[in-house]
Amino acid sequence: MIAYSVVERTRELGVRAALGATPARLIELLVGQGTVLIVSGVAIGTALAVGVSRLLRSLLFGVSVTDAVT
């Protein structure tokens, strides 16, 4: 997702650089966007994992949901 996002913004980054943005500012812009994607992905993944673990708890007999060996 991050690589695709950077490819999609190539022209925008070129225009920003032409207008005087420093390379550090361009990297900051991309890292900030990547951080938003990562944090939202972790939040969604955690919420789904909790939901699925509750579903699995009702389906498992004699096994803990957090049993790593199983």
Image: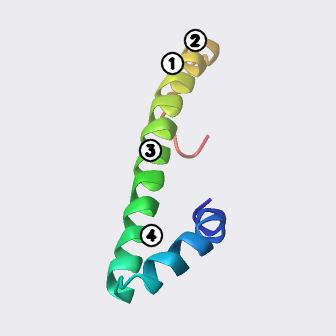
- x, y percent for residue 56: 60, 21
Q: Amino acid at mark 3?
A: Ser
Q: Amino acid at mark 2?
A: Ser
Residue corresponding to mark 2: 58
Q: Amino acid at mark 4?
A: Leu
Residue 30 image label: 4
Residue corresponding to mark 3: 40
**Other-residue count near label 3 (Cα within 10 Å), few / some / many at <14 / 14–19 / ≥20:** few
Farthest residue to the front: give it. Answer: 19
Residue corresponding to mark 1: 54
**Mark toward the viewer: 1 or 3:** 3
Spatial CA distance of label 4 from label 1 is 36 Å
**Mark toward the viewer: 2 or 3:** 3
**Secondary structure type for disc 2:** helix
**Secondary structure type for disc 3:** helix
- Quick one: label 4 or label 3, which is nearer the N terminus? 4
